[in-house]
Image: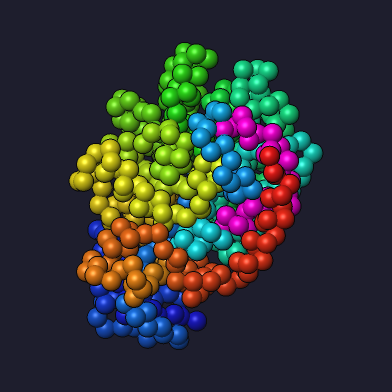
């Protein structure tokens, strides 16, 4: 059954940045068929959007959904001291808690306009099974696409790492489990709803050998690779002391700077390292709120984009950004870019592009991120008749600058996930109640 949305401002995010004022968009069988202005095509189902803005669904490129269980902790901490406080609590995670946490974070993301979520899960206490399966189940129920990582840590405190020894795993177990999850859950090709990524946690919690073997496994299976990198000055000092080089040089040595890799944060990069990212095709997940919350600094996004680097946005986990609202990150990305580089450093449309096309490029997905014929019908519809956009004659800039907003309607693969600002397939109040029950087990 074909659906035609009319009387809309359609932001396609195609290469030319085409927008259709008084436009329409047609989708059928889960895919965009056409978008335009002027004469409208026929359709089975026609909706008048009353001047709403239609954008591609947003793509989140960095999160730790389990951290919704431990919000507003370690309130003044930097990264290392905060992790030290939180690791022992996170060691309590199991499939039941992960399911409650994932439903909460995914519901928040969906209501912020996000249709595809990457989640970096790396806490797998020995003997607790089904954690990643629980997260995937939550995504299927809420209705968003998920790229779930089988993350890992194998460098415990007794070997010079940061995490407690009880939270680190053996390399062979990590690799075998990653391969099992790939076989059980990963979908390849356009329209995939569930994918697996390989994501050892960070230079201070993973050995070089696990980094190298993870990359070899991912490349054999055709999966994307992710890790945290160059987030804080403390991490930089740690790498110099332990490895005798910067975090970026360390990753380069391990064969990790490549087109199938993206790294979270990348706040502390030299000019040469920015160029190296551009030259190797390595991507970046920019997480501005998290970086501000931890006092880590501001990533050089203008320089990264000018060097041709793939850049997407991430909310990051709720231990460093309590709110899983990706539209808020669009506004934050604009604000921090201007705080660092002046008023010309980023336009509203560029910020929105990071969260849509940029995110899709970072995840190496060419089936999402823009509204063009043949792409997945993943779209976010934003009302423009409320209090916050009165007086805005440029609706797209107004939307970004007045953000965040609760999305009015969210469509994933042609199916409604949010309608009238409410989840269609899940009950927001029930998710919040169930989450509170689980979160009690994570009290300090
Ligand atoms: Zn993170």
Front-most of 419 and 198? Answer: 419
Front-most of 130 and 182? Answer: 130
- Residues shaded magenta: 82-106
Picture residue at 37% right of the left edge, 44% below the top: 311
Picture residue at 31% right of the left edge, 48% below the top: 334
Name of the residue lying farthest toward the left:
344
> Residue 70's image quarter?
top right
* Image coords of residue 224 (percent x, y): 52, 42
Name of the residue lying farthest toward the right:
127
Colour mode of the rendering: rainbow
> Residue 52's image quarter?
bottom left
Residue 92 magenta-highlighted: yes
Q: Which secondary structure class fits the magenta region best? A: helix
Tell me if I can see residue 204 in this picture. yes
* Image coords of residue 165 (percent x, y): 71, 25
Above-or-below relation of 395 to 46: above
* Image coords of residue 299 (percent x, y): 36, 36
> Residue 219's image quarter?
top right
Picture residue at 51% right of the left edge, 35% below the top: 76
Front-most of 185 and 17? Answer: 17
**45 displayed left or right of 217:** left
Above-or-below relation of 208 to 274: above
């Amino acid at each position: 059954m074909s659906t035609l949305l009319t009387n809309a401002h359609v932001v396609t995010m195609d290469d030319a940045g085409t927008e259709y004022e008084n436009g329409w968009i047609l989708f059928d069988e889960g895919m965009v068929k056409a978008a335009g202005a002027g004469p409208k095509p026929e359709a089975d189902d026609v909706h008048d959007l009353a001047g709403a803005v239609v954008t591609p669904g947003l793509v989140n490129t960095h999160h730790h959904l389990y951290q919704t269980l431990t919000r507003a902790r370690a309130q003044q901490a930097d990264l290392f001291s905060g992790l030290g406080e939180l690791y022992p609590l996170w060691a309590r995670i199991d499939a039941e808690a992960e399911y409650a946490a994932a439903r909460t974070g995914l519901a928040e993301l969906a209501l912020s306009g996000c249709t595809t979520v990457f989640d970096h899960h790396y806490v797998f206490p020995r003997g607790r099974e089904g954690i990643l399966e629980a997260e995937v189940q939550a995504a299927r129920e809420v209705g968003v696409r998920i790229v779930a990582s089988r993350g890992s840590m194998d460098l415990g405190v007794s070997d010079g790492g940061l995490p407690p020894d009880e939270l680190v795993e053996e390399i062979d177990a990590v690799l075998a489990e990653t391969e099992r999850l790939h076989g059980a859950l990963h979908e390849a090709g356009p329209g995939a709803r569930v994918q697996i990524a390989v994501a050892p946690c960070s230079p201070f919690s993973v050995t070089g050998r696990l980094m190298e073997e993870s990359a070899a496994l991912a490349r054999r299976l055709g999966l994307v690779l992710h890790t945290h990198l160059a987030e804080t000055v403390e991490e930089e000092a740690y790498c110099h002391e332990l490895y005798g080089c910067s975090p970026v040089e360390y990753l380069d040595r391990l064969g990790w700077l490549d087109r199938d890799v993206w790294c979270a944060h990348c706040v502390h990069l030299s000019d040469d390292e920015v160029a190296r990212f551009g030259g190797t095709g390595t991507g970046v997940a920019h997480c501005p709120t998290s970086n501000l919350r931890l006092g880590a600094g501001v990533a050089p996004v203008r320089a990264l984009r000018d060097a041709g680097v793939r850049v997407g946005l991430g909310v990051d986990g709720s231990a460093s950004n309590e709110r899983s609202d990706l539209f808020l990150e669009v506004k934050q990305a604009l604000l921090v870019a201007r705080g660092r580089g002046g008023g010309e450093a980023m336009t509203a449309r560029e910020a929105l592009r990071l969260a849509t096309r940029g995110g899709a490029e970072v995840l190496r997905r060419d089936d999402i991120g823009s509204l063009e014929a043949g792409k997945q019908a993943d779209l976010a519809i934003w009302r423009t008749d409320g209090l916050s956009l009165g007086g805005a004659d440029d609706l797209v800039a107004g939307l970004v600058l007045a953000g965040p907003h609760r999305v009015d309607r969210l469509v994933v693969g042609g199916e409604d996930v949010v309608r009238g600002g409410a989840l269609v397939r899940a009950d927001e109040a029930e998710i919040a109640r169930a989450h509170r029950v689980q979160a009690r087990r994570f009290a300090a």
